[in-house]
Image (spheres, rainbow, N blue to C red):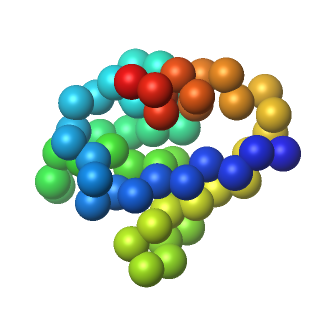
């Protein structure tokens, strides 16, 4: 299992994470920033625990 962590306030809304991992990321229509699908928010940081099979595409999303 892997844990994906997102600091949403640092998002610039470039859509690169959505292109790398469409099943885990979406762009909010409200503010144009990315949303971690299934993420739980705690003090402005979103996290989700997911299966190892998503690791490669989410590492690419983080790199982008």
Residue at 39 percent across and 24 percent down: it is 64
Res 36 seen here: yes
Judge whether 45 appears above or below 55 on screen. below
Judge left or right: residue 37 versus residue 57.
left
Residue at 80 percent across and 39 percent down: it is 51
Asked which quadrant contains residue 31, the reply is: bottom left
In the rendered image, the residue lying farthest to the bottom is 43
Residue at 27 percent across and 47 percent down: it is 11
Residue at 22 percent across and 30 percent down: it is 14
Judge whether 5 appears above or below 41 on screen. above
Q: Position of residue 63 (x, y in %)?
A: 46, 26
Judge left or right: residue 57 versus residue 55.
left
Q: Position of residue 23 (x, y in %)?
A: 55, 31
Q: Position of residue 3 (x, y in %)?
A: 69, 51
Q: Residue 26 or 56: which is nearer the viewer?
A: 56
Judge whether 24 appears above or below 22 on screen. below
Asked which quadrant contains residue 50, the reply is: top right
Judge left or right: residue 7 versus residue 3.
left
Q: State how many labels appear.
A: 0
Res 28 seen here: no
Quarter of the picture holding the N terminus: top right
């Amino acid at each position: 299992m892997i844990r994906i962590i997102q600091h949403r306030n640092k998002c610039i809304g470039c859509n690169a994470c959505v292109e790398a991992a469409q099943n885990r990321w979406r762009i909010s229509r409200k503010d144009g920033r990315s949303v971690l699908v299934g993420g739980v928010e705690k003090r402005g940081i979103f996290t989700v625990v997911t299966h190892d099979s998503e690791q490669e595409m989410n590492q690419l999303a983080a790199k982008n």
